[in-house]
Amino acid sequence: MGDEVEDPRSGQRLVFRRTGGDVLEVDLFVSAGAFVREHVHPAQEETFTSVAGTFELEVDGERRTIRSGDSVVIPARTPHGFEPAAEEAHLLVTVRPALDLGGYFHAFLSLSREDRLRIPPRGLPKPLLLFAALMHRYRREIAAPGIPVWLQRPLWRVLALLGRLRGYRVD
């Protein structure tokens, strides 16, 4: 895993501070207009600490504003994401346990940067079969909100298999 991954399309740059073991720490730099669709981490707690700028995060349907020095802890299985950022911000993101969320960040941001995967603020990601391969590969780390994990895992597996037949791979 490299030290940094950037995707101008999504407006995110991650600098990896600590990987592996029980903790993943990254510096997350977001540009104005950057967003992350709502998602859940089935078995991970995620903490956002604002280093610079003001940042708005949606946690379980509630908007939270964090300013420099503020932190928000998001328990496992809690839906969260953020709408297009109003301004640039720098956050320290800490995830426990790390699992392979760093691998997910690298895969997702690389696919987006290369314009191979497009995830709009609303609607279905394109191509859906590549997205399914990503979700299946990182099923321990990330899941869609609002659908029970036990139900979406077999769905992602089947769609990922179809994607593999079409040449979509996430390694």
Image (tube, helix red, strand yellow):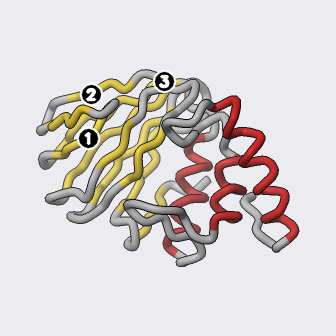
- Label disc, if present, on residue 72 of the rendered structure: 2
Q: Residue at x 30, y 61 (%)?
A: 34
Q: Residue furthest right?
A: 165
Q: Residue at x 20, y 41 (%)?
A: 51
Side of 87 relative to 166 (left or right) = left
Residue type at numbered disc 1: Leu
CB within 8 Å, label 1 to label 2: yes
Q: Residue 63: image x %, image y %? A: 20, 37
Rendered position, 61 above or below 106: above
Side of 60 relative to 142 (left or right) = left
Badge 1 element: strand
CA distance separating discs 3 and 2: 13 Å
Rendered position, 42 above or below 105: above
Residue type at numbered disc 3: Ala
Rendered position, 145 above or below 114: above
- The foreground one among 15 and 120 is 120
Q: Say which residue label 3 marks.
A: 76
Q: Residue at x 54, y 64 (%)?
A: 125
Numbered disc in front, either 3 or 2: 3
